[in-house]
Amino acid sequence: QSVLTQPPSASGTPGQRVTISCSGSSSNIGSNIVNWYQQLPGTAPKLLIYSNNQRPSGVPDRFSGSKSGTSASLAISGLQSEDEAGYYCAAWDDSLNGVIFGGGTKLTVL
Amino acid sequence: QLQLQESGPGLVKPSETLSLTCTVSGGSISDSSFYWGWIRQPPGKGLEWIGNIYYSGSTYYIPSLKSRVTISVDTSKNQFSLRLSSVTAADTAVYYCARGPAVYLSYWYFDLWGRGTLVTVSS
């Protein structure tokens, strides 16, 4: 069981806005930044959001990240079929002294 | 542009040592702006960070694997490597090498990933 808790699945229709949550504790999200990765089927993960809400070059502004207390969220607006993928949150954990990932959320575009 | 490519045996016997190499092309592993890391993903499961190394050789490992893991760097070959000893079936996974900016520990993230290589532990 992951230290960071994500819903195993989420879904939405094209054009819709969906959010994916990531719940942690004071030793990880509560005191450190959160990053998000997108993993398309059969491919390597790709950095989607870093430092809570920063988008790397090339990532559409439809993707946004936020953090409040010990939880973080990834929002995807204007949902597209190509957004169907696995999404993982990640953060440093001061107690475990390492990088931890959430269990992942599989997003389905209906 | 910079690319990462994992290589190594796809099948390892239980109790033996898993050895993988990540070759960096299109850039220098000695670039002080970056660190280099390994992450794995068991089939159908989530991601697990294994450890990071800086070009100088400084390493950080996940505590749960620390006793079995060694990550090293060979700047002359522009490669870094992973060794995981005493493997069991639980170590079966896709192993990814990745790059991240050289920032303070708690700000770490991976901005470039290799394609990954599947390693199966089986007799």
Image (cartoon, rainbow, N blue to C red):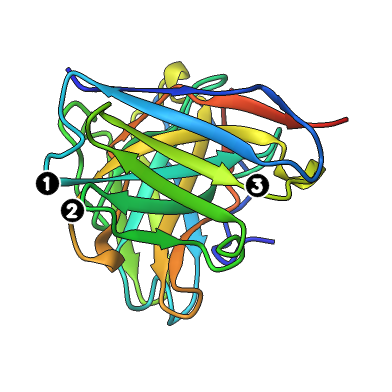
> Do callouts 2 and 3 point to residues on the same chain?
no
Q: Is the residue A45 above or below the residue A24 in the image?
A: above
Q: Nearer the viewer, mark 3 or mark 1?
A: 1
**CA gap, disc 1 and disc 2:** 5 Å
- Dot 3 crowding, Cα within 10 Å, few <14, some 14–19, many 20+: some
Q: Is residue A78 left or right of residue B27?
A: right
Q: Residue furthest left?
A: B32
- Helix, strand or loop at label 1? It is loop
Name the amino acid type tagged 2. Answer: Ala
**What number is the disc on residue B33?**
1
**CA gap, disc 3 and disc 1:** 35 Å
**CA gap, disc 2 and disc 3:** 32 Å
- Helix, strand or loop at label 3? It is loop
Q: Nearer the viewer, mark 2 or mark 3?
A: 2
> Do callouts 1 and 2 point to residues on the same chain?
yes
Mark 2 belongs to chain? B
Q: Is residue B79 left or right of residue B64?
A: left
**What number is the disc on residue A50?**
none
Name the amino acid type tagged 1. Answer: Ser
Q: According to the image, label 2 marks what residue?
A: B102
Question: Of callouts 1 and 2, which one flags the residue occurring earlier in the amino acid sequence?
Answer: 1
Circles 1 and 2 in contact, beta carbons < 8 Å: yes
Tell me if residue A54 can be seen: yes
Along the viewing direction, whichever of B11 and A48 lies nearer the viewer:
B11
In the picture, the quarter occupied by the C terminus of chain A is top right
Name the amino acid type tagged 3. Answer: Pro
Q: Is the residue A19 above or below the residue B7 in the image?
A: below
- Dot 1 crowding, Cα within 10 Å, few <14, some 14–19, many 20+: few
Q: According to the image, label 3 marks what residue?
A: A8
Mark 1 belongs to chain? B
